[in-house]
Image (cartoon, helix red, strand yellow):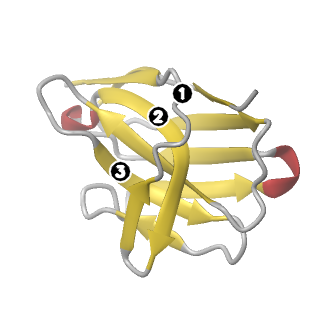
Amino acid sequence: EVQFVESGGGLVQTGGSLRLSCAASGFNFDDRAIGWYRQAPGKEREVFSCISSGDGRIYYSDSVRGRFIISIDDAKNMVYLQMNRLKTEDTAVYYCAPVVLVGTMCGLTREYWGQGTQVTVSS
């Protein structure tokens, strides 16, 4: 059974930091890309950061570039997201999932879904 489990969310003040983890089990990372996306109430789902396990290519959306850092540990089947200088608009449920990363575009494959981890940034 394939599972993507996100953890590390919480409540933080504006300007603070959080580190999210994504544990993938039953899923082969070889030459695949994994991404982070988020969903806030009343807003569209946003895929904002992706990383390729094969060649390390990385994608960031404009909304998080320069503040968030994605990394991958192929040996452990883990993907991490270091979030710095958090803003109230970063408040959302954060998910990880397989993605397709082509050039400067990253999109969900919709193969598997996690339960998400809540990130709340207070002013």
Q: Residue at x 35, y 46 (%)?
A: 85
The amino acid sitting under disc 2 is Tyr
Callout in the foreground (2, 1): 1
State yes or no: discs 2 and 1 in contact (Cβ < 8 Å).
Answer: yes
In the picture, the quarter occupied by the C terminus is top left
Label 3 or label 2, whichever comes before in sequence order: 3
Q: Amino acid at mark 3?
A: Val
Side of 32 relative to 25 (left or right): left
Helix, strand or loop at mark 3 = strand
- Residue 95 numbered tag: 2
Q: Residue at x 71, y 37 (%)?
A: 24
Q: Residues within 10 Å of mark 1 (few under 14, many from 20)?
A: some
Q: Which residue is mark 3?
A: 47
Identify the image quadrant of the N terminus: top right
Q: Secondary structure at mark 2?
A: strand
| Measured Cα–Cα span from mark 2 to mark 1 | 6 Å
Q: Looking at this rendering, what residue extends furthest in the right direction? A: 75
Q: In this rendering, would 75 be left or right of 87? A: right
Horizontal side of 19 relative to 43 (left or right) equals right
Outermost residue to the bottom: 103
Q: Which residue is mark 1?
A: 114
